[in-house]
Amino acid sequence: MSLFASLSPLHLDPLHLGLLFSSALFCLGLVTALARSNTILVLLGVELMLNAANINFIAFASRSQGAAASTGVLFAIFSIAVAAAEAAVGLALIIAIHRHRRSVRLQDANALKG
Amino acid sequence: MPDLSLLSFLAIALVTLGASAAAITRRNIIHSALLLVAGWAGIAAYYLWAGAEFVAFAQILVYVGAVSMIVLFAVLLTRLGPGDTAPAPDAFQRAAAALVAGGACFVALAGAILTSPLDLPAAARPPAVAAAPAINVREIGLALMEPAHAAALLVIGILLTVALIGAIVIASIDRREADHSGEAAS
């Protein structure tokens, strides 16, 4: 089998597909967090990266049985709960910073910059 | 002949990645936030495809329902100033550097994934993923009440309580400070 034939989606199993999907999403979240200067969008990029990690848990859990499957699903649920807490605190911080500096640009929040 | 399962996965991945990629390029932040919400809904569809129904509905409740609402509230509360909509002078340079970093990261990850054999015990199973859920809600509830996970469940509950109270404290207006500065605290 040539390299290109083995790389087509028809010959990849669902685990490979899920992992590739999650790495693409992770990199999109990374680009969002690095390229945008609006703090809210940077936080959403980090959330996207967390979601990509959750996809990995589900991709591995969906091909295992019994206790291993339940561990993966439970880890994803805990991860979603922690991500929700992180989003709430992060957006509260953004609102507080906006109240003090009248801006949501990352470059303007430089009071602690050396 | 591609089967239906593969086609539905490709559709889900295309919609999710397309919405997330379009969110990077939008200049209007509300458009970006709504496109990212569409991406989260696509991720929930992937969970359904992979047979994790409970996680899919938790994703819809938490992300598409709750997190999207507080993101939209944050966007509306942080009203943009006149200079905020203009692109920064080094915006293009930053975007190029971010694209290079993200592309390199994806190449490294995809290379590692495609070259690893992933010889798991169930590797010989046919790719009928959505045939049956790997675990149902009753099993999830029983597993959460096991001694191994009950402590983690309690810690998550305390974490959520503390984090949400802390978020309110951080975002609330300090009344004395507002009075001193003569700012209306409405």
Image (spheres, coloured by chain):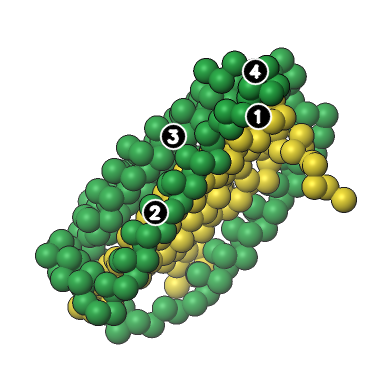
Q: Which residue matches tag 1?
A: B177
N-terminal-most mark, 4 or 1: 1
Crowding at mark 2 (Cα within 10 Å: few <14, some 14-19, many 20+): some
Q: CA distance from mark 2 to mark 1?
A: 28 Å
The quadrant in which the N terminus of chain B is found is bottom left
Label 4 marks a residue whose chain is B
Please say whether residue B32 is visible from this viewpoint.
Answer: no
Q: Are marks 2 and 1 in contact (CB under 8 Å)?
A: no
Task: Give the secondary structure at mark 3.
Answer: helix
Task: Give the secondary structure at mark 4.
Answer: loop
What number of labels is visible?
4
Label 3 marks a residue whose chain is B
Label 2 marks a residue whose chain is B
Q: Position of residue B25 (x, y in %)?
A: 60, 32
Q: CA distance from mark 2 to mark 4?
A: 32 Å
| Of residues B29 and B2, the one drawn nearer to the viewer in this rendering | B29
Q: Which residue matches tag 4?
A: B183
Q: CA distance from mark 4 to mark 1?
A: 9 Å
Amino acid bearing label 3: Ile
Q: Are marks 1 and 3 on the same chain?
A: yes
- The residue mark sitting in front, 2 or 1, is 1
Q: CA distance from mark 2 to mark 3?
A: 15 Å
Amino acid bearing label 4: Glu
Q: Are marks 3 and 4 on the same chain?
A: yes
**Chain B display color:** green
**Chain A display color:** yellow
N-terminal-most mark, 2 or 4: 2
Residue A28 vertical placement versus B151 (above, below): above
Q: Which residue matches tag 3?
A: B70
Q: Which residue matches tag 2?
A: B160
| Of residues B172 and B80, the one drawn nearer to the viewer in this rendering | B172
